[in-house]
Image: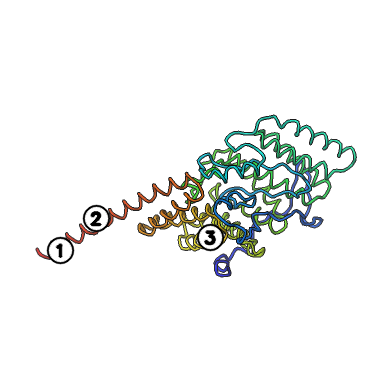
Amino acid sequence: IAAPLQDFPHMSSPRRSPARKGLGGISRSLGGSSKGGWGHQSWLEVDPSAVPSPIAAAASPAAMPRAMQPLRVEPPAEWNTPCHVQPLESTNTNVAAREAMSRLARRPLVGAPTSPHKAERVRDHGMLEAACRRAGRASNAGVHAYNRGVLYENMGAHDDALACYRECLRIALESNDATSEALACNAIGVSLQTRAVAGLSAASHDAGELEGTATQLTEEDESLLREALSYHEQHAQVADAPGRFIAHSNIGIAHQALGDAAAAAEEHEAALRCAVQMSSLAGESLACAHLGTVKASDDAPTAKACTERRLLLSRTLGDAVGKADAYLQLGLIAQEAREWAEAREAFEHAMREAELSGDQRVRELARCSVGIAEGSLRFEGMLAAAAEGAGREGDVA
């Protein structure tokens, strides 16, 4: 673990904003805050010995998030928050994992927002929020505002969800509630971020993402991403160690979408440092995946080292999806260096791992990449043979 840390000199000085600013002019200096007291993220505490198989790993409530996917903070259990809809692509053929994740989300598999038949739950939380306000229990009112936001988001009513999250943040700032502030900032930032760049969601794993290619953004999308950055930075100011890991990861993903690879790398380095401090193999694996993606365009050796570390950790954690993505990234790095044999081998491994995890999209991408690498290897062999033949003929003449 120590070796990669020495290669990142900027880890000790992550980018920070000077103050945490709220809505409607509400702001609070750093001096009067306390760290949020929510529970640690379940996937950050994955026990490798408790993961018996790739299918069980994919179906586990602590399943690893995919690289380049904005990360959410888990609210405290006592909030009784509805689960967010889990983004599963329709091409996933792992039936056991799909059914388990559907039960986890307590909703149908993703493909369309849930129907408004849950509207009565939204009204219930609205009534409880109003009752808590009248009783002077501001923190409880914020909890119900947050829960309403989750329900709205699951129903596809993103504007209403955002309004609820903002209300939760306003209440948190007024009541000096660091836990609610962190959760609300994370929820607002992720909502804005995923709306701006659909390619950053878990359902999108195309080659451009794996290579770190910046998505083409409209002016409106760029504005949403920059607003999301301000909330993620505010989250980093008030969060505990797992929360800082999530905040830095989200900031790095947003910077990468904006085309600022240097700032993205700095934030992912800070996230890696948080993971090492927490002794979280899952967090280190994800941070290495992000660094491998960011560094691929301008620092191939570092990108390869980070991706190989991610592959090793994915094996330890039983993360079949992580292994497939790591092999695919290693193949892309080798392909860029015109190391066709190495690229072909990595793509073949990616294809096999994708089959195990039921990831049809990565499997098809890896299969096409195997063909490209094989064709390029044969073509270069033909050119080398032709050049050698021409050299012998020249010697004879």
Asked which quadrant contains residue 346, the reply is bottom left
Residue type indicated by callout 3: Arg
Residue type indicated by callout 2: Met
Q: What's the CA distance linking mark 3 and mark 2? A: 37 Å
Q: Earlier in the sequence, mark 2 or mark 1?
A: 2
x, y percentage for residue 361? Answer: 47, 44
In the visual, does 234 lie left or right of 344? right
Secondary structure under tag 1 reads helix
- Which residue matches tag 1? 392
Residue at figure coordinates x 15%, y 63% from the top left: 392
| Tag of residue 382 | 2
Q: Earlier in the sequence, mark 3 or mark 1?
A: 3
- Residue 185 vs residue 201, the one in the foreground: 201
Secondary structure under tag 2 reads helix
In the visual, does 306 lie left or right of 245? left
Secondary structure under tag 3 reads helix
x, y percentage for residue 24? Answer: 77, 40
Asked which quadrant contains residue 119, the reply is top right
Q: What's the CA distance linking mark 2 and mark 1? A: 15 Å
Q: What's the CA distance linking mark 3 and mark 1? A: 49 Å
- Which residue matches tag 3? 315
